[in-house]
Image (tube, helix red, strand yellow):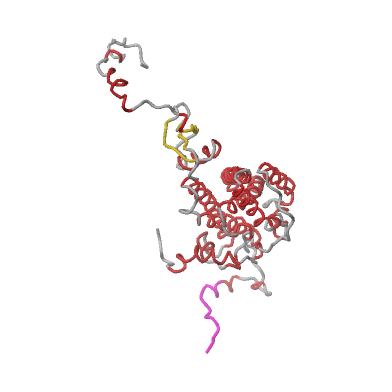
Amino acid sequence: MKDWPLWEVFVRSRGGLSHRHVGSVHAPDAGIAVRHARDTYTRRMEGVSLWVVPSASITASDPSDDAAMFDPAEDKVYRHASFYNIPDHIKHI
Amino acid sequence: MPSLPPIRPEDEARAHQARGQGAFDAPAADEPDLSLFEYALRLGDDSLILGQRLGEWTGHAPSVEVDLSLANMALDLVGQATHFLGYAGKIEGRGRDGDKLAFHRDVLDFRNCLLVEQPNGDFAQTMARQFLFSTWQKMLFDRLTASADEFIASVAAKAVKEVTYHQELSAEWVIRLGDGTEESRRRMQDGLEWNWRFVPELFEMDELASEAASRGVGADVSAFRPDYERIVADVVAEATLDLPPQQRAVVGGRRGHHSEHLGHLLCAMQFLPRTYPDATW
């Protein structure tokens, strides 16, 4: 079991919502990974759909690169769409 | 000096109400349906004993994920047992509820098939037992959803979904371990061979089972034996394993003739409620 690869688990909690990362499981292959995800993360009615992805397939940003990656967005408040007057008759925005 | 039991006022009242001409000793019209009681016991005991067996893995499984899989199945089965044994107690009408039947019956009074009481062995042997049992139980519950007994039909309708999952999961493990490493393959082949002699009992149609089937309450298990054998053969072939050779069938569980293993299981399961009858959660 020590050589079982790691799988990231994503659960859709209700129809219409997107899958959210909830954790990971060890499993010998994708089929068993779905079973393990079901038995580990949806035993209290947490979900209606499951995805599993081999953890090794995920490419992550480099933490040592954080400053260059994320800090430049800090002073760009104009990127939020909050500078417009919304007419009264527009409801769902 | 030994004496006769005292005649209580309620005994007198019953004697007064009885019809004459010896009718007092005749069975009353509202006698409990003992064959339905017995049939519900069989269903409940199968689930209860296998649930207890799987529970023994808790904390000992090969990985935490497998630990949860086994405990989830155990809880499904104990839930089924709670329904069936509670119902059996109601039909019997002697004030025994599901807990009383589970924890205060002795080994000879259990009506489960021998397969479910077999020891866990290693993980492969446990999965072989689960696959052989769940495949059968799924086919049985499929049919019981159409039972003439409304309660049995409703429990079967809920449980068949649980058991479908048990069947799929255990079949996947049979295939993976069989078609795995040299060691896992040997262990799964041994696991199948250990459990094989207890399969024929699942398809026994004794007098009670036949009566239940003819009343439309129970299912004729012999009718789906060819389908069962085909599914088992397919999975065993996909696992690149060999069907075990014919063995002398071991039967008797439905009549209370159990293997030595059941007594040990009951010791662990019944110890607490028998030692501390007033214990509550």
Above or below: residue B162 compared with residue B97: above
In-front residue for pair A62/B36: A62
Side of B88 relative to B240 (left or right) = left
Q: Which secondary structure dominates the residues rendered in magenta?
A: loop
Give the residue drawn at x 59%, y 48%: B184
State the image quarter where residue B257 is shown. Answer: bottom right
Q: Residue furthest front?
A: B182
Above or below: residue B191 compared with residue A44: below
Numbered disc total: 0
Magenta region includes residue B268? no
Magenta region includes residue B8? yes
Image position, residue B245 (x, y; %): 73, 54
Image position, residue A86 (x, y; %): 31, 11
Q: Residue furthest left?
A: A75
Give the residue drawn at x 36%, y 16%: A93
Quarter of the rendering occupied by the C terminus of chain B: bottom left
Q: Give the magenta part as a residue range.
A: B1-13
Image position, residue B92 (x, y; %): 59, 62
Image position, residue B34 (x, y; %): 64, 62
Give the residue drawn at x 63%, y 64%: B31
Above or below: residue A26 compared with residue B31: above
In-front residue for pair B210/B75: B75
